[in-house]
Image: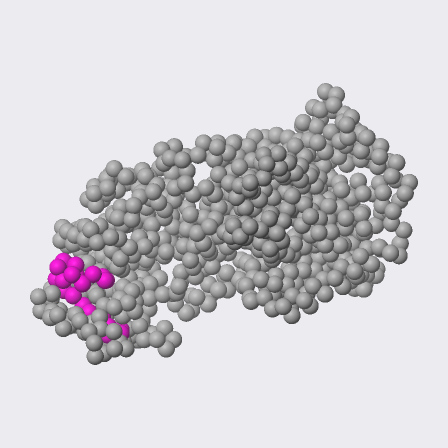
Amino acid sequence: MGTPPVFELTDVSVRYGHVHALSRINLTVQQGERVAVIGPSGAGKSSAIGLLNGTLMPTDGRVRVLHCDLAAATARQLRDVQRKLGTIHQQFDLVEQLRVVNNVNAGRLGAWPFWKAVLSLLLPREVPKVCQALDRVGIGEKLHMRTGDLSGGEQQRVAIARVLVQQPVAVLADEPIASLDPARGAEIINLLHDISIETGTTLLASLHDVDIALERFQRVIGLRCGRIAFDAQPTDLKREDLAALYALELEPGRT
Amino acid sequence: MAAAPVRTTERANLPELALREAISVRPRSGRSFARRSIAIAALLVTAGALLATGVGHAELIRAAGFSQLVDFFRASVHPRLDAAFLALTGVATVTTLAYAVLGTALSLAIGLVGGVLSSETWWQSGTRGRRRRSATAGWAVTRTLLAIPRGIHEVVWGLLLLSLFGIQPIVAVLAIGIPFGAVTAKVFSEILDETSRRPYTALITAGASRPSAVLYGLLPPALSELFSYGFYRFECAIRSATILGLIGAGGLGFQLQLSFQALQYNEIWTLLYALVILCAAADFWSSVVRTRRAVPRVLRASNRPRRDRILVGSFIVAALLVPLSAWWIGLDLSVLWADRTWSLARQLFGAAWPPRLGADGPIGLLKLTGVTLGMSIVAIVFAFLGGMLLAFPAANLTRLVGRTKGSRLGLALRLIVVAITRVLLIVLRAIPPPVWALLLLFVLYPGLLPGALALGVYTVGVLGRLMAEAAENLDARPLQALQANGAPPPHVFCYGVIPAAAPRFVAYGLYRWEVTIRETIVVGVVGAGGLGLLLNQQLASFDYGGALATLITLMVLTLLVDFASATIRRSLR
């Protein structure tokens, strides 16, 4: 392939004390891919996302993001990489007390000098860009609302708008729809999917909803007990693979 | 990833906010043995402290003074109300208010910056080993730096700054702003550390720098709590500004002292009324702001009026008061960087180092430390008992136990009792301890007991109010369950209210003990004895080496009391 991969994990393990969150993971994600990570609770999905956005350092192995070895990077290099990654969280992680416009602009903080950040709290900067992003996620009219007054689905849209103004190379989504009802959840995934196609950004999302993962993503990775159980296109996946992925550990005979 | 601290859903109420000023303790399961031994130790210590202040072996009560006291109280209905004196009182009141406003503003600025810099969140954003160690060191250093100004009372700051600047308006502003700022920083750092770290982490993850991430992710949720606490500090600042008046800053305290020296009882009453009204107004303003802010948005009548007019108005008024106050007292900041100030500072430090012990050596200092400790213990025991006694009549418990079937008359009587007790508490805490000491000197011989009682009387006002608010904030459900079982109100009170409130009361009592040990200085300054008197004498006679030794002793004593109080609070929780 011409362009180097966006994410590259080589023999990566993460341990918390005696608990193995991830064991010897190998994973490569290319530019523009849309990948879903599924698996039961505690399988290591959040740890994987944490490794990729540089908030978690591996116990063993190498994590390369956009040519940069994160463990060896200086603080400045790490920040430069992080600026190119947008992350969306289950709890949205917005500041409820701020107006929507400021929450969206928070995505630009990595690129702004401090004085501009201060000024923008009083007189919001780059409002046209914010409006464009909010229009794209479908809540353009909420620009000046207090974020805490919005519904859960709307708040997740604000979080996506925040990632949009950041103009990242890749978007990481850590269970983005786990706090939403199925209908809102499906809309959010569609939105992320469409944005990924329009802007050519890589999308990697961890999900609980297997059907959405199979339907909306080109590639599905199954994690179980910190290991990759399968890494395949949805069409290649069989019912048994999925059943085995979610099987209860204590009762191996029953599925 | 490290578990993010969970944000408490309930907003901290005033007693809990005030408690944050003390050392924080991790709760431990209470053990009855520890409780019992602490109770016995408390009794013994109190008896010892009473002996130390002269109860039982010295002549204490001055019978001849009673007629004077009667005269004094007779004057209460004839305050001096002619135009000239009213104008004087008005000017003095505004001056005291101005000092309080500027001191609070400075303390908020210090608290905001210091709070961020001493929060764990600020230092713990690094993920790697080497950086984490240096971060822990940085956190410990800022915490320690802030602990020093906190241990020194406003009046001591005032005396020290007076030596540096001479009589200048800036002295009172700094004397209030520096120690209050350090306390505010501690409280604010704890508020910040309890605020959800997720939005902040999310911004850091997106590549934002720490200052920007703090600005967008951490401050907005925590800021309103800081301002709410700032309004509470403003009430305290008015009391401090009055006390600073006694050492020469002007305002109500200064006028009170002049009138006391001239024994003009009716003038004293005019000034006391002004002081009580000022304090009551500040208390009222502060509690309106705090309760309005505490109402969750969803419960407000409608979503339409986006902003609470009274809240916004309060902030605008507060912001306007700052420049007005600076103009009123003629604040001159240039003395801060004047050459004279710096050369004087060098001289002062040169004279103070190394610290020197007085003629009595370490034993003398130790004795005075014991006396100071004894005073604080008598004061806090008195205040605790008095506060308990007044807290329940002052607490409006009708919300907790629901509408009883009692008559309208009964309810009205109850509310009258609440109102009267609250006014009493306001009066007790509006009049600063040195003034209480001067009043007590009518009927008591000068010495430690009037000093201790003066502190105690004042602290009854503070503690009674904290306890009353704590009682009002009790969980209503167990009380309503008792009531539903047919228990009459006195039984509900004994079985529901007292057991639930008692541990909190003890915690507030211990926290106020930490404050009281610092305040013994204040009554010492008016002659009650202990380390405060010594320090005042040393500064007046330019014995800076001795003053430094006293100051260090005082700081060590303060630290020991803080530590003892925190240990007891932990074993009681």
Q: Number of callouts in the render?
A: 0
The residue at 51%/38% (across/down) is B289
| Residue A212 part of the magenta segment | yes
Horizontal and vertical percent for residue A48? 27, 67
Q: Is B229 above or below relative to B557? A: above
The residue at 47%/43% (across/down) is B294
Instruction: Work out whether residue B528 or residue A108 is closer to the camera in this orientation and state it.
Output: B528
Q: Quadrant of the N terminus of chain B?
A: bottom left
- The span picked out in magenta is A206-228
Whether residue B375 is visible to the viewer of this picture, yes or no, is yes
Q: Residue furthest front?
A: B486
The residue at 44%/34% (across/down) is B308
Instruction: Work out whether residue B449 or residue A203 is closer to the camera in this orientation and state it.
Output: B449
Q: Residue furthest bottom?
A: A253
Left or right: B34 as drawn, with respect to B540: left
- Which quarter of the figure has residue B327? top right
Horizontal and vertical percent for residue B358? 81, 59
